[in-house]
Amino acid sequence: MALRLINSAVLRQLASQLPKSAQVGSVAGVHTLDKIGKREIVGYGWNGTACYADRVDYPMPAVRFREPNNEINALRTKEQGDWKKLSPEEIKALYRASFCQTIAEVQAGTGEWKLHLGVALLFSAAAIWVAVLMNLFVYDELPVTFDEEHQKAQLQRIIDLEMNPVTGLTSKWDYENKKWKN
């Protein structure tokens, strides 16, 4: 009974918002009513709009999912009586007339993460191939100073010239014993 009063109050409120002429009124209200068709408005709605959406954070949409037909109307009149007389199939039919999905179906994973992972791996593989091809065809060979022999000679030159003896590399060299400090 209370649901019928709320339903009629919401219908009166929406009817009062309809424009009196083409230039006055809420255009959004008119378009919303065009979109819902003959479906019942049963609540305030998400942000006050008469729309349907399956959402976990807003489980009670403003309009029913399906438009009423003879079967649903018969079930609604039977619903007004004793619920124990309704079969489980009739209860499910009533539920599906009001909602598209159950909460469990809404919360179920869609598998969209697989697409995102695949795209990320595809871009990673492309980046690796670009790096390999750049190393093969674009960059020059490393200079000879990168050889181990040349690096040892450079280190010996730094030690011999006593470069940065306070905090640098040569501060760890023992000049008296000719070996690295512990």
Image (tube, grey):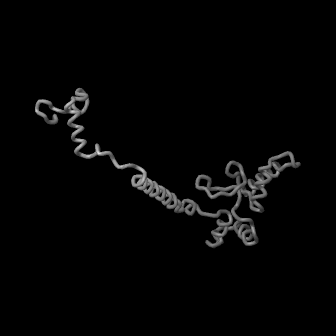
Query: How many labels, in total?
Result: 0
In the picture, measured across the screen, residue 110 lies left or right of residue 72, that is left
Q: Position of residue 131 (x, y in %)?
A: 42, 53
- Which of the pair 174/85 is nearer the observer? 174
Q: Position of residue 61 (x, y in %)?
A: 67, 56
Residue reaching furthest right? 21
Image vertical order of residue 103 relative to residue 23, above or below: below
In the picture, measured across the screen, residue 112 lies left or right of residue 39, that is left
- Which of the pair 62/108 is nearer the observer? 108
Residue reaching furthest left? 177
The residue depicted at 85 percent of the width and 45 percent of the height is 24
Instruction: Write down the quadrant of residue 41 in the picture.
Output: bottom right
- Which of the pair 148/74 is nearer the observer? 148
The residue depicted at 59 percent of the width and 63 percent of the height is 102
Instruction: Write down the quadrant of residue 82 in the picture.
Output: bottom right
Image vertical order of residue 61 relative to residue 152, above or below: below
Q: Position of residue 163 (x, y in %)?
A: 24, 29
The C terminus sits in image quarter = top left
Image vertical order of residue 126 relative to residue 79, above or below: above
The residue depicted at 76 percent of the width and 52 percent of the height is 10
The residue depicted at 61 percent of the width and 71 percent of the height is 88
In the picture, measured across the screen, residue 168 lies left or right of residue 98, that is left
- Which of the pair 127/71 is nearer the observer? 127
Q: Position of residue 93 (x, y in %)?
A: 66, 70
The N terminus sits in image quarter = bottom right
Residue reaching furthest top? 166
